[in-house]
Image (spheres, rainbow, N blue to C red):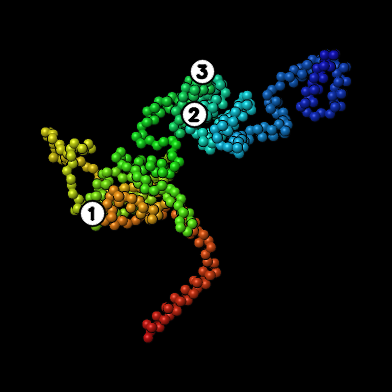
Amino acid sequence: MKCARCLLQLQCLTLVGQSARPAAQYGTLLQSASSSQLNVLHKTQHQVLRRFHGSPACAKSRPVRAEVINEDNKKGDGSLVTYDNLFEQVTKEAQTKATFIKVVNVFLKRDVRRRGHVEFIYAALKKMPEFGVERDLEVYNKLLDIFPKEVFVPVNFVQRMFNHYPRQQECGVQILEQMENYGIMPNIETKVLLVQIFGLKGHPMRKYQRIMYWFPKFKHINPFPIPQQLPEDPVDLARLSLTRIANDRDAKVIVYQLPCTDITESGEEVTLPHVIGIQSPSQMELLAKHNPSKPVFVEGPFPLWLRKTCVYYYILRADPTPPEEKIEEPYDPERCFFYPLQLDLDLDRDMGEEESFDVEDLDEGPVFAMCMTSRGDEATLNQWISGLQQNNPILGQVPTLFRLDAGPKELQGAADSESGHDHHQRPDPETQREERQTEKEIVEEELQRRSRGMKQ
């Protein structure tokens, strides 16, 4: 009987957790259990066993507290926004590499299981340009180190075939793609991390193998490379830009004026811009042969992009030579490496074949010199022309015309002034209606006067 009473007590405890029966029912059950028979004991044992071995549907149908649901929603909702806020909190100090690694270390120490590591890595990849670490290989390896090790490695070919842990593999491939976009070459540490995280046959490892195959082939394929860090000095930046445009080893860069601040007689401070030009010996020969009766033109500004920096340059050019005035000079065969001048071939040619080479020649006029300056007005460019006269005395005889377009700052200022002018001086709709009515009355009077003249 004691066993039956104990079993009934256990049954009462389970029923209390699942439903809200009153305490009086359980008291009556305990009283009746003391005087029950053996068959009742057998039935109660079967009932207790059913309670212990319940189906999963019963477990799913159990009510869950609202507090637990709210906590889960708070944890799982907006994880990426939470990590963005974490980076924004650190940016109050300074956006440097040390602060970025500090945020990563904070995430690593927060949870041993690295929960939410995929969302954190995506947020970190988005914030890397703001911290200036988008070209740092150490930081990329630090992001790869966030992944748990030896968890996402496929064990058999079935897991490998069905893309084992796809979200984590896509995140790893995204890290390597951002490295590829910025031209960062992985190292042996990157390979070791990828093998520990995804194994030798994962998609990130295949991406790493493709990068290591193609990057060495295309790393130095550009014959005119641009340095990663452009010079901050405007004079040095102008030297680099003009040398890149000219593409002539014999071209000489001349500094006509350095940026400085001068004080006038009235006591006003005047900032003088820098004027830097470039000219090659072949351009000097073309300018010396130019007809003095025809003008030369100063045109610009023309944009030139060096990575994320845009600079502007000006050119000194002339109109194309008319076809009737062109003089064909014989080429020296020892100096011509592009097109053969004579075909000394004893071959039977068809009548339809031509010995001439079809080369599209666009004559846009010769360019005599180029320059860069921070102020593209006519007075500043006159200093450049006067400096060119020292090596090109023919410029004192040739008329110079300026064809200058509005620069980026001038265009922006003009747009602002026009918008402000329209905003302040826009007429009211009532005045516009009055003007239209007066115009109609004047037109009607004019028509009536003409009709009277016709009748007379």
Marks 2 and 3, Cα distance to the nearest angstrom?
32 Å
Q: Quadrant of the C terminus?
A: bottom left
Numbered label attached to residue 137: 2
- 2 or 1: mark nearer the eye: 1
Earlier along the polypeptide chain: callout 3 or callout 1? Answer: 3
Earlier along the polypeptide chain: callout 2 or callout 1? Answer: 2
Marks 2 and 1, Cα distance to the nearest angstrom?
58 Å
Q: Residue at horizontal 86%, vertical 27%?
A: 24
Q: Residue at horizontal 34%, vertical 56%?
A: 402
Q: Residue at horizontal 63%, vertical 24%?
A: 112
Judge whether 197 appears above or below 389 on screen.
above
Residue 85 showing in the rendered view: no
> Residue 268 location, x and y as percent?
48, 56
Q: Nearer the viewer, residue 16 or 119?
A: 119
> Residue 290 location, x and y as percent?
24, 52
Judge whether 269 appears above or below 69 on screen.
below
User: Identity of the amino acid at label 3?
Assistant: Asn
Q: Which residue is denoted by mark 1 in the rendering?
A: 291
> Residue 433 location, x and y as percent?
52, 70
Contact, mark 3 vs mark 1 (Cβ under 8 Å): no
Q: Quadrant of the N terminus?
A: top right
Numbered label attached to residue 156: 3
> What crowding class fits label 2: few (fewer than 14 Cα within 10 Å), some (14-19), or many (20 or more)?
some
> Residue 446 location, x and y as percent?
42, 78
Residue 42 showing in the rendered view: yes
Q: Nearer the viewer, residue 51 or 387?
A: 387
> What crowding class fits label 3: few (fewer than 14 Cα within 10 Å), some (14-19), or many (20 or more)?
few
User: Identity of the amino acid at label 1?
Assistant: Asn
Marks 3 and 1, Cα distance to the nearest angstrom?
82 Å
- 2 or 3: mark nearer the eye: 2
> SS class of the residue under badge 2?
helix
- 3 or 1: mark nearer the eye: 1
